[in-house]
Image (cartoon, helix red, strand yellow):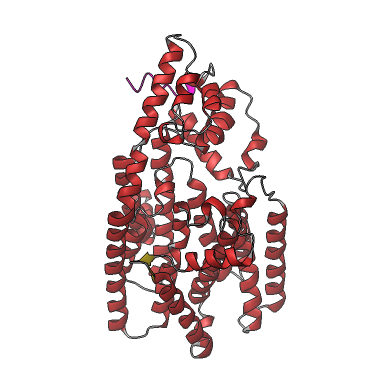
Amino acid sequence: MIFFHLKKKFHKYQIFLTVFFLVWSIRLLWIGLYGVDVPFWDQWDGEADSIYLPILRGDYDLKHLISQHNEHRIFFTRILSIVIFLLNGHWNTVLVMQIQAMIPGAIAGFLAQTFWKINRSYSACLGIAVYFAAPLGTENMLWGFQSQFYFMVLFSVISIYYSSFGESNRKFVLSAFVFSVFAFFNIASGALVAFVISVVSCLKLIFGLSEDKKKTILISISFLLLFVFEIFFTKLPSGHEELHASDYHTYLNSLSLYMGWPGINKIGFGYYIHGFTFSLFFIILIFKREKLKNPYVQYLISLQIWIYAQILLLVYARGGGSEANIANRYLDILSLGPLFTFFILICLLNRKRIILFANLSFLLLSIVFTNRVIREGFIERASLFLQREKMLSVLVTAKRMEAKEKGSSLPFLLAKTPVLELPYPDATRLHMLLTDPLFDKMMPILSYRE
């Protein structure tokens, strides 16, 4: 009986499982080729000093789980780090990379399983797998402290799903609210999912799509209040003001950059994608209004509105100073826009042959896109991550100096600045961590680097 029950479950979720394992396996390959087991930048403060050493001392404060890291409250990233650390017995940043690679696999599987219901195409599902397996957000993939970006996307697409399909279902509405809260406790822009659900609920009232107007109004107000609470719950850290788009000129320049992604041969190819997306919106509103009754169409449009909300916030928050260009870690969010546009197009097509051609085209474009990412962006950036081997040798040398009591390793670390040869920009701070009595128990760097 148990076997048949499991077999039935597998058949029900085989699309999810297949896409999940495809994406995870390919990402494990990238990590195996380019991942380096040396903590980098924020990991020393965000993990070593704030999580692992306090746990080993027995004085870890659980309030830290929801405290801010820059603008963000990375609750789920900290939970994941703690679980891996306790189960593994010591800090292994490559292992964290490998585990967090499951999250984009889950996102791809969830979207493939959802879209399968409106587009029963194996080529489209394979296209999604290829799309998410592409090593686009290299920083997130090869840096073991970035799961908050993946968690935010996962919880957001699930929250919007429940809100799109569950206006008359109390459990679905509650699930949408819970996952909306979950999305916030990753990166600050996770708050936008509550705002988008509130706006979409208002649009349902405007276009007469609501089954129960009073309930829709209540949902809109509830999610709007959640959004406002999350905004007030977020404190802007000092020192980040220069990263904001401080005036309209800077904002528009940054917006142009974000909207133009992906740029191909110095052409803002993204402009064409967004133009096509807005054309589809226009067709639906003017000529295909009946399509708005389809909850899958509502879901996809909600996802696109969420993408544009993400872009507008990113442009403001990271549109100036040293991050005026698009940071690599944000590409895992921006890349979702073309994917949602494709499935909106599928919802508007009627003829099977045209749909088949569109699905095959999507698979081909996904392969071409992945190939371009690997050839023109990933290899060069990944090679920079391999430079961490030099940083690792700096750590090992400094630790050996301390272990053999040949004097303080601080002068040696200071000589290795700037950051090119040092995995943390503050040599004095890194020296304090290396000489902590519990460092060897947290990261037995000498024993497993011999």
Task: Count up the numbered dots.
Answer: 0
**Residue 410, horizontal then vertical, whole percent:** 50, 20
- Was residue 443 drawn as part of the magenta stretch in this picture? yes
Q: Is residue 442 visible?
A: yes
Closer-to-camera residue (78/189): 189
Which quadrant would the C terminus be assigned to in this image?
A: top left
The quarter of the displayed image where residue 349 is located: bottom left
Q: Residue at x 35, y 63 (%)?
A: 128
**Vertical arrangement, residue 71 with respect to residue 62, above or below:** below
**Residue 360, horizontal then vertical, whole percent:** 27, 72
Farthest residue in the bottom direction? 287
- Was residue 303 drawn as part of the magenta stretch in this picture? no
Farthest residue in the top direction? 405
**Vertical arrangement, residue 114 with respect to residue 411, above or below:** below
**Residue 2, horizontal then vertical, whole percent:** 38, 49
Closer-to-camera residue (311/347): 311
Q: Residue at x 50, y 68 (%)?
A: 256
Q: Is residue 161 visible?
A: no
Q: Residue at x 54, y 59 (%)?
A: 156
Magenta-tinted stretch: 441-450
Closer-to-camera residue (160/316): 316
Would residue 57 appear left or right of 406 to someone viewing this image?
right
